[in-house]
Image (spheres, grey):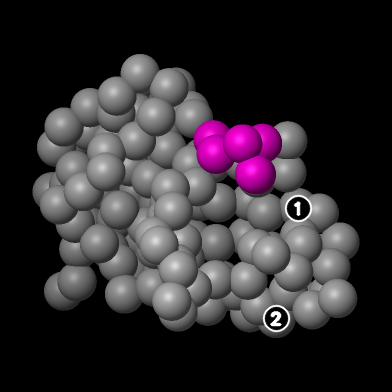
């Protein structure tokens, strides 16, 4: 069983919404920092949002006010609600987990566990 499995990606028009889900294996769920990253071909990987054990959250400036990261402890699932989507949000999105805590106001640069990625495409 893969430790992290994303779902919920797809195609949407600009201004629309998507919710990404990440099923996290119990042995790594909420042990430390969980986060979403994104990457497009030829671009550097970018941290999008993170949530720590205590529920504190951090966001990239480019998504603040539009994206919300959350978790469901009963379902051991990480979410990323994405509203007001823009074409520049088009990327492959990855959920991540690590036993280390999130740095204050940020995320780990190299989390240990990664999902396989889910594609998000936003058309203008």
Under tag 1, what secondary structure?
Answer: loop
Q: Are marks 1 and 2 in contact (CB under 8 Å)?
A: no
Report which quarter residue 16 is drawn in: bottom right
- Count of number-bearing discs: 2
Relative height, residue 91 to residue 82 (above, below): below
Residue in the image at 33% along x and 42% along y: 34
Q: Is residue 19 magenta?
A: no
**Rendered location of residue 108, percent (x, y):** 27, 38
Residue 74 shows up from this direction? no
Circle number at residue 93: none
Residue at the spot x=29%, y=24% of the render? Answer: 103
Residue closer to the observer: 101 or 42? 42
Crowding around mark 1 (Cα neighbors within 10 Å: few <14, some 14 to 19, many 20+) is some
SS assignment for the magenta stretch, majority? loop
Q: Quadrant of the N terminus?
A: bottom left
At horizontal 40% and vertical 62% (from top left) the residue drawn is 44
What stretch of residues is rendered in magenta? 59-64
Q: Where residue 43 appears, x then y in whole percent? A: 45, 68
85 displayed left or right of 101: right
Q: Which residue is mark 2?
A: 11
Q: Judge by depth and name the residue closer to the eye, 18 or 42.
A: 42
Front-most of residues 116 and 91: 91
Q: Is residue 68 visible?
A: yes
- Residue at numbered disc 1: 83
**Nearer-the-camera pick, 92 or 76:** 92
Where residue 119 sits: x, y (%)? 53, 78
Quarter of the view holding residue 84: bottom right
Residue 61 lies within the magenta run? yes
Q: Quadrant of the C terminus?
A: bottom right
Identify the element where label 2 is drawn. Answer: strand
């Amino acid at each position: 069983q893969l430790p992290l499995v994303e779902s919920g990606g797809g195609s949407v028009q600009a201004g629309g919404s998507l919710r990404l889900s990440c099923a996290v294996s119990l042995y790594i769920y909420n042990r430390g920092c969980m986060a979403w990253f994104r990457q497009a071909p030829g671009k550097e990987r970018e941290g999008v949002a993170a949530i720590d054990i205590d529920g504190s959250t951090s966001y990239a400036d480019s998504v603040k006010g539009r994206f919300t990261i959350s978790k469901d402890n009963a379902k051991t699932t990480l979410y990323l609600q994405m509203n007001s989507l823009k074409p520049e949000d088009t990327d492959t999105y990855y959920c991540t987990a690590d036993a280390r805590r999130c740095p204050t106001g940020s995320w780990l640069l190299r989390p240990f566990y990664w999902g396989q990625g889910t594609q998000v495409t936003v058309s203008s």
